[in-house]
Image (cartoon, helix red, strand yellow):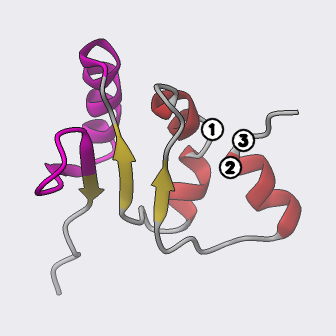
Amino acid sequence: MIQTLDHVAQCYGISNVGFVKIDVEGNEYDVLLGAEHTLQASNYPPILFECDNPAISAQLFLFMFNLKYNIVRVRGASNMYLASRPLPSK
């Protein structure tokens, strides 16, 4: 049985996720679609993910940019990325 992060967070009362690591072999976009509420409720935590497929990465990166994430490639890894949002200004 596959469940979304939003479903699991709601069932277990998880209200503040501090970091997300995704390794789902090409299904990153689907994982993030199922985590959108949790990401918002957790003030958009950093996300570490792999992406090997250019067709998937275009859709995935656009989705993350729309959530105001900045994405950088992890040094030393050709397919690993870190997405984070700027800290709020005071």
Element type where label 1 sits in the image: loop
> Sequence-wise, which precedes: disc 2 or disc 1?
2
> In the picture shown, does residue 63 fall above or below 13?
above
* CA–CA distance in space, label 1 to label 3: 5 Å
Q: Which residue is mark 3?
A: 4
Q: Which residue is located at x 50 percent, y 57 percent?
A: 40
Q: Check disc 3 and report its element: helix, strand or loop.
A: loop
Which label belongs to residue 47?
none
Badge 1 or badge 3: first in the primary sequence: 3
Q: Is residue 65 shown in magenta? A: yes
Choose top left, top right, bottom left or bottom right for residue 17: bottom right
Question: Contact, CB < 8 Å: mark 1 with mark 3?
Answer: yes
Q: Is residue 2 left or right of residue 25?
A: right
Q: Amino acid at mark 1?
A: Gly
Give the class, few, some or many, for how many residues have Cα within 10 Å of label 1's Cα (few <14, many ≥20): some
Residue neighbourhood size for the residue with mark 3, other residues' Cα within 10 Å, grouped as few (<14), some (14–19), many (≥20): some
On the image, the x and y values in percent for residue 46 come to: 36, 64
Residue 2 point in image, percent of width and height: 80, 34
**Residue 89 part of the magenta segment:** no
Which quadrant is the C terminus positioned in?
bottom left
Kindly report the distance in space between the C-alpha atoms of the residues bearing marks 3 and 2.
Answer: 4 Å
Q: Are marks 2 and 1 in contact (CB under 8 Å)?
A: yes
State the residue position of label 2.
5
Can residue 74 be seen in this snapshot?
Answer: yes
Q: Establish if 68 lies above or below 60.
A: below
Residue type at tag 3: Thr
When the figure is inspected, residue 19 is found, relative to residue 26, above or below; the finding is below
> Which residue is under mark 1?
34
Q: Secondary structure at mark 2?
A: helix
- On-image quarter of the N terminus: top right
Q: CA distance from mark 2 to mark 1?
A: 6 Å
Q: From which residue to which does the magenta span run? A: 53-81
